[in-house]
């Protein structure tokens, strides 16, 4: 009996985290008819939890982040929403970099991945980047987070080459 209690204690000890607030939210939500058929949203820490908490952007994470090409997801990027559409996809991304930093990084990354930059400009607090490849055109609107301007968010919209 003592061994069983000790084993249970070890299991519980392994479930804790450094932040007391996150330990109480570790339970998975109950499956509904809508969510039961879908893959669950990523739950592993992505390193952006402190930014999401401090900057009031919420805990939203897309169930299907791989809709967004890797060229638009440098390390420390959270895909908050992603939806496939008949003519492409839409997404919202959270970056751990300022508007100017992520704009420069994305310009380099997309060109290395075979996209051509059609248009783009950065004004420091917001930026726009339009890119294209054989699959179609993608437009990003990047803006500084209101509560934390050293970080940024992008809305992404694509249209397939046929659309």
Image (cartoon, rainbow, N blue to C red):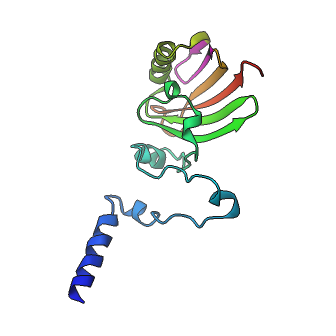
Q: Is residue 31 left or right of residue 49?
A: right
In this orientation, which residue lies closer to the viewer: 28 or 122?
A: 28
- Picture mark count: 0
Residue 44 is situated, as x and y percent measured from the top left of the image, at 42, 50
Q: Is residue 27 left or right of residue 143?
A: left
Residue sitting at x 50%, y 12%: 111
In this orientation, which residue lies closer to the viewer: 156 or 58?
A: 156
Residue sitting at x 39%, y 43%: 47
Rendered position, 63 above or below 75: below
Rendered position, 3 above or below 28: below
The residue furthest bottom is 1
The magenta stretch is 120-133
In this orientation, which residue lies closer to the viewer: 42 or 118?
A: 42
Quadrant including the N terminus: bottom left
Residue 35 is situated, as x and y percent measured from the top left of the image, at 64, 58
Q: Is residue 51 left or right of residue 122?
A: left
Q: Main secondary structure of the magenta part?
A: strand
Residue sitting at x 44%, y 28%: 74
Q: Does 128 appear in magenta?
A: yes
Q: Is residue 73 left or right of residue 45?
A: right
Quadrant including the C terminus: top right
């Amino acid at each position: 009996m003592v061994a069983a209690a000790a084993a249970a204690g070890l299991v519980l000890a392994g479930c804790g985290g450094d932040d007391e607030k996150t330990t109480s939210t570790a339970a998975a939500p109950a499956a509904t008819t809508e969510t039961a058929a879908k893959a669950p949203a990523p739950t592993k820490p992505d390193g952006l939890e402190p930014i999401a908490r401090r900057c009031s952007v919420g805990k939203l994470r897309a169930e299907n982040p791989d809709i967004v090409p890797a060229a638009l997801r440098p390390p420390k990027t959270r895909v908050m929403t992603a939806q496939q559409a008949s003519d492409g996809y839409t997404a919202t991304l959270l970056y751990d970099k300022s508007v100017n930093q992520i704009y420069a990084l994305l310009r380099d990354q997309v060109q290395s991945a075979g996209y051509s930059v059609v248009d783009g400009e950065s004004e420091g607090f917001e930026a726009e980047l339009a890119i294209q490849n054989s699959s179609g055109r993608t437009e990003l609107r990047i803006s500084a987070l209101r509560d934390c301007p050293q970080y940024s968010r992008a809305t992404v919209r694509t249209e397939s080459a046929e659309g």
